[in-house]
Amino acid sequence: MRNRTLWLSLIVLAALLLAACGPSGVTPDPESGQLTIVQQDDDEGMNFEPESVVLTAGQTVTIVLENHGTKDHEFMIGQNVIYDDTGAPNGFEVDFFEGIEDQVEVDLGEGAMLMIDSETVAMGGMEMEGDMEGDMAEDDHDDGEDDHDEGEDDHDEGEEAGMEMHMDHDGWMVMDAAGSGTTTITFTVPEDRTGEWEMACFEDDGTHYEDGMRGTLVVQAQ
Ligand SMILES: [Cu+2]
């Protein structure tokens, strides 16, 4: 008898523990579907806030992305980080948005960019026309005086070289320039994306990722 009580207690305890171990993280607001993710950097490092997010398959979600840092930051979601020849993290093997790119509605903050497989698809506050790279090389878009020190003539090591580095990764990415305001990403979470994903920024040769700019994104079944 005593044994049975003990067993029952253990089973109840185990059930409670399992329930507590469900995916933990911030969920979208039940009414608006909005979930704010802030990109931060300071002397102590960089990160996403929150670092853990839980979405539900079938749910329509708006990720509100804000760069509160002093640097440009990326936002990618994927699985299996790829490392380049030098051992630097450089993107994901599996892209969360693969195949659903045109079902994702993106409203870019001024100066933010949407890139798919290294191509700039859209830029905040600007119509996409003609040769994007040419435009950008010439265009000294005024994202504020406090911005990175891109002299007009240092095309080699400055913005242009930086752009090429950003464009290295495959997959879907928002490039969120410092001071670019709010970008919203709205989509319905597909059933087939159920599972555990990672959010990441691979800026500056992957050093942002290594410095903590990553988080988990779990898609739970309905
Ligand atoms: Cu970053």
Image (spheres, helix red, strand yellow):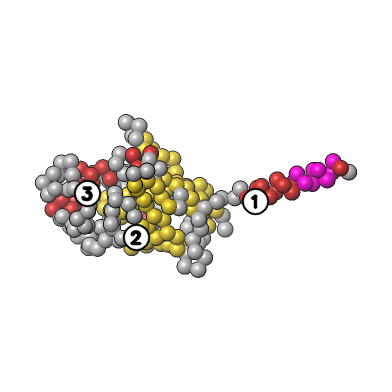
The residue carrying mark 3 is 148
Q: Nearer the viewer, residue 114 or 98?
A: 114
> Where does the image place residue 120, in percent across and percent down from the top left?
26, 53
Kind of residue sitting beneath label 1: Ala
Kind of residue sitting beneath label 2: Thr
Q: Main secondary structure of the magenta part?
A: helix
Furthest-bottom residue in this view = 31
Magenta stretch in the rendered image: 3-10
Question: From what the image shows, is residue 28 above or below residue 84?
Answer: below
Q: Residue at x 30, y 39 (%)?
A: 205
Q: Residue at x 24, y 63 (%)?
A: 125
Q: Earlier in the sequence, mark 2 or mark 3?
A: 3
Quadrant in the picture for the C terminus: bottom right
> Where does the image place residue 208, in percent across and percent down from the top left?
35, 42
> Where does the image place residue 123, in percent across and percent down from the top left?
26, 58
The residue carrying mark 1 is 19
Kind of residue sitting beneath label 3: His
* Crowd class of label 3 (few under 14; some 14 to 19; many from 20; radius 10 Å): some
Query: Tag 3, which secondary structure?
Result: loop
> Where does the image place residue 94, in percent across and percent down from the top left?
42, 44
Furthest-top residue in this view = 86
Closer to viewer: mark 2 or mark 3: 3
Residue 147 part of the magenta segment:
no
Residue 9 part of the magenta segment:
yes
Spatial CA span between label 1 and label 2: 34 Å
Q: Nearer the viewer, residue 1 or 69?
A: 69
